[in-house]
Image: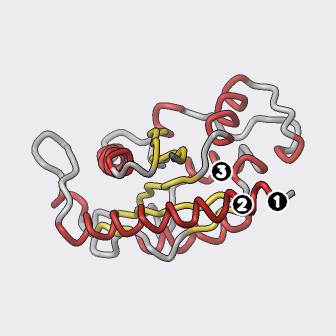
Amino acid sequence: MYTLKVISSTVRPGRKGPAIAQWINELANASGIFQSELLDLGIIDLPLMNEAVHPRLKQYEHAHSKAWSAKIEEADAFIFVTAEYDYSYPASLKNALEYLLHEWAYKPAGLVSYSIGPFAGVRAMNNLRPDLLSLKIVSLGEFVTIPSVDQFLNEDGEFVPNEMIHNSANLMITQLRRWTKGMKAIKEDK
């Protein structure tokens, strides 16, 4: 079984991301392919990058950096759940990515994007992909996009996907398994 980290990117009050992240985390765990853990950046609460030494040296000074490094290092794969803020992804995710370097490398990532409007977070995803690639994270061609996210939240705030979203997520998880298997071989080939 592979280790998966589902990263919820939003931090502001009233955010919708944790409900979506909880759903995809449960789906990944139920697949029998991954042992998945939800990492909520709103709870982790990383300060703006405050390490004096470049992350390529892995000489972290602060406890929050060391803890973040350990969580990301143990992952075989990721699913990033991102909102669309001003045509891009949230600064909290950019900050979390930039804290580390080697820990991200040679691992695949599924993307789940959403927005309160009709664009389904596609512009956020399109901005995220090149940043992931610069960290040697391979983002899959199979992804999940959720338009007008409020229509999929029930009265308890739980995310309830339609059949199309659910099928997209299952396909992404299946492909993530294939890429995880392949990327582990690449990562181990030093």
Q: Earlier in the sequence, mark 3 or mark 2?
A: 3
Q: Position of residue 55 (x, y in %)?
A: 82, 44
* Tag 3 near tag 2, CB within 8 Å: no
Q: Which residue corresponds to mark 3?
A: 97
Helix, strand or loop for disc 1 = loop
Q: Is residue 66 above or below residue 37?
A: above
Q: Identify the element where label 2 is drawn.
A: helix
Determine which residue is flagged by label 2: 185
Residue type, label 3: Leu
- Lower sequence index among marks 3 and 1: 3
Neighbour class for label 1 at 10 Å: few (<14), some, many (≥20)? few
User: Residue drawn 84% across and 38% down?
Assistant: 58
Q: CA distance from mark 1 to mark 2?
A: 6 Å
Q: Which mark is residue 27?
A: none
Q: Would you name the residue on which mark 1 appears?
A: 189
Residue 62 in the figure: left or right of residue 37: right
Which amino acid is tagged 2? Answer: Ala
